[in-house]
Amino acid sequence: MSQSSSTSQRVAFLLLGASLALGFIIGSEKLSTAIAQVRKMQPSIMVKGVATQNVKSDQAIINYIITWRGTDAAIGRKAFLVQRDIFQKKLLDYGFKDAEINIEAIEQVRLEPANTKTTAAIEYDKYARGTVPDFVYFQRIKITSSNVDLVDKLSREDFVFENDVELDRRLLAYKLVQVDDSKKELLVEAAKNARARADILVSGSGSKIGTLLDASQGAFSIQAKDSVGDSDYGSIDTSSIDKTIRVVVTMTYEIVKE
């Protein structure tokens, strides 16, 4: 057999393989299209299932900021440290652990006197309140604890500092950290709820619910207890200790004759 004849045979085999592969691809696409069309034509029903669960927050976060402002930096720093240490001891006496108390580094700001020639109102958070510089010390303290009730009690306490040292509460949040197990349980319950709704909707029609055609998760929300609405948008509440988890699923079922 000549070399040109052998080459022609290889080319023919390659073309045959390509044709078969192309035919398989086209056939698969047609089959998929046909299946999709059949599904569109067959009677079906789409329903939403909902499940809720009441839970309690398992983590609380509260942030404070300690500040001092004045013209004598040395006196201010001393007064600031004394009051800061008193506050830290109070937190430990409350029952919080060292690991739950995060104290950031002290920050110092020097504010220069404003230009008195301007007629604009002076922004005293940017300029000194007099004719000499002001010094500001501030420090953030963050408490993160699983003892939610203790943080709640602390949040109601009114602390009074001395020597121009002030304490401000900047954040209070109640969170739900361990939520995966509850979410799985609720997905199961929401799916059962969707199936029950579908059964009710077709009852008495001479048909019944058949194969599950499609399923998807909808809104997942954590709201203050008993305040959950019917919104399809997920949201997370951080202001309440007692919460309600709400899960929504959408299920599409085939409808078949009984």
Image: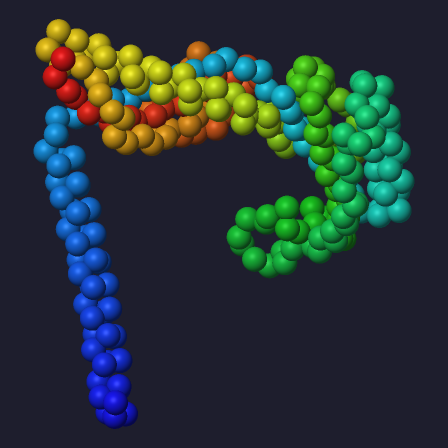
State left or right for residue 114 relative to residue 160: left
* Residue at point 26%, 80% (across, down): 10
Front residue (pair 165, 237) = 237
Residue sitting at 84 percent across and 48 percent down?
A: 73
| Foreground residue among 219 and 133 | 219
Colour treatment of the image: rainbow
| Total numbered labels | 0
- The answer to whether residue 131 of the structure is visible from this angle is no
Task: State left or right for residue 218 relative to residue 141.
Answer: left
Q: Vertical placement of 66 versus 225: above or below? A: below
- How far across and how far down the image is residue 78, in percent? 89, 40
Q: Could you tell me which residue is drawn at 69 percent across and 23 percent down?
A: 146
Residue 227 versus residue 184 in the image, above or below: above
Quadrant assignment, res 187: top left
Q: Is residue 219 left or right of residue 205?
A: right
In the rendered image, which quarter contains the N terminus? bottom left
Find the residue positioned furthest to the front: 1
Q: Where is residue 184 shown, x and y percent of the image?
A: 48, 24
Residue 28 at x, y percent in the picture: 21, 52
Q: Horizontal placement of 87 versus 201: left or right?
A: right
Q: In the rendered image, which quarter contains the C terminus?
A: top left
x, y (%) of residue 252? 24, 27
**Of residues 168 and 38, which is closer to you in this image?**
38
Determine if residue 40 is in view.
yes
Residue sticking out furthest to the top: 204
- Work out whether residue 178 or residue 25 is closer to the camera in this orientation and state it: 25
Look at 54% across and 54% down and name the residue there: 119
